[in-house]
Image (cartoon, helix red, strand yellow):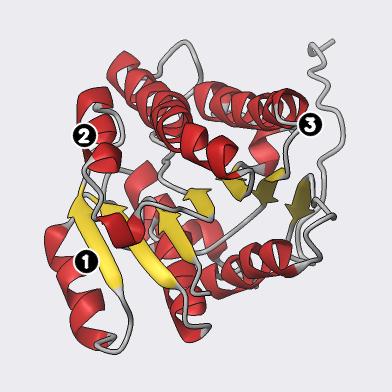
Amino acid sequence: MQKTILITGATSGFGLACAKRFAAEGWQLILTGRRTERLQNFCAQHPAVTVHWATLDVRNRGEVEQFIHELPDTFQKIDVLVNNAGLALGIQGAQEADLDDWETMVDTNIKGLMYLTRTVLPGMVKRNRGHIINLGSVAGTYPYPGANVYGATKAFVKQFSKNLSSDLVATKIRVSNIEPGLSESEFSVIRFHGDKKKADQVYKGTQPITPDDIAEIVHWVTSVPPHVNINTVEVMPVCQSCAPFAIHREKA
């Protein structure tokens, strides 16, 4: 039986790589994103793949609910939901950060993930099968200067994933949280509000994780035996590690 996967934020980065990876396995795809042309291009480049797509802003609860409830019959039985849509904005300290950026991160990384999960989950419970895969971040565990609200939203993703597993323990539904470290995609370009030169500096002298690396991990967690759940995958490039505690010393 052909399986169906819903991937949010499928127009670039991890989401696009996941779409390509699962398309190669013959899965039926439901793809959402905010850039219509990129979704159309994906379909044009993969004519043999069964795709249902929509331009969708996950921050809009009504839009999300309408999209899921109006899926064509052949796409109604979602086997895997990949909550990938998310972003970081700014790197300023909390005392200087833009409140609009903070609200956008909360609305996308937390509320958008909640809306999709809550809307898709009843169908999975009814069928007693399914898999929720959330894209978290090592920033949800390890602090760094400027991560303030972004890191906090990913800490939410971590705890929400664990609590979902608790709620669903009497079902056969799986929940996984994938937590990437330094990864090269459009992530930093968006974080620096389109300043590609500044974004490129983030990866200078490193070999970061690629979207294809994460897509391979997402595919792997779906392919283990049905009685096995991969709770969390924390993944960093070899060139990255956890920083030591920071201590500020006053000058004598």
> Of the residues tagged 3 and 1, which is closer to the observer?
3
Q: Which residue is mark 1?
A: 39
SS under mark 1? helix
- Type of the residue with mark 1: Leu
The label nearer to you, 2 versus 1, is 2
Query: Do callouts 3 and 1 mark residues in contact (Cβ within 8 Å)?
Result: no
Name the N-terminal-most of marks 2 and 1: 1
- Image height check: is 242 above or below 50? above
Q: Is residue 37 left or right of residue 221?
A: left
Is 157 situated above or below 172?
A: above
Q: Secondary structure at mark 3?
A: loop
Quadrant that contains the C terminus: top right
Circle 3 residues within 10 Å: few <14, some 14–19, many ≥20: few
User: Is residue 69 or residue 248 the one in the foreground?
Assistant: 69
Q: Tell me if 83 is positioned left or right of 164 in this view.
A: left
Q: Which numbered disc flags the more N-terminal residue, 3 or 1? A: 1
Indicate the amino acid at tag 3: Val
Whether residue 206 is visible to the viewer of this picture, yes or no, is: no
Residue 167 sits in quarter: top right
Residue 239 visible to the viewer = yes
In-front residue for pair 133/233? 133
Q: Secondary structure at mark 2?
A: helix
Residue position for label 3: 169
Q: Position of residue 131 (x, y in %)?
A: 62, 49
- Within-10-Å neighbours for mark 2: few <14, some 14–19, many 20+: few
**Where is mark 2, residue-wise?**
66
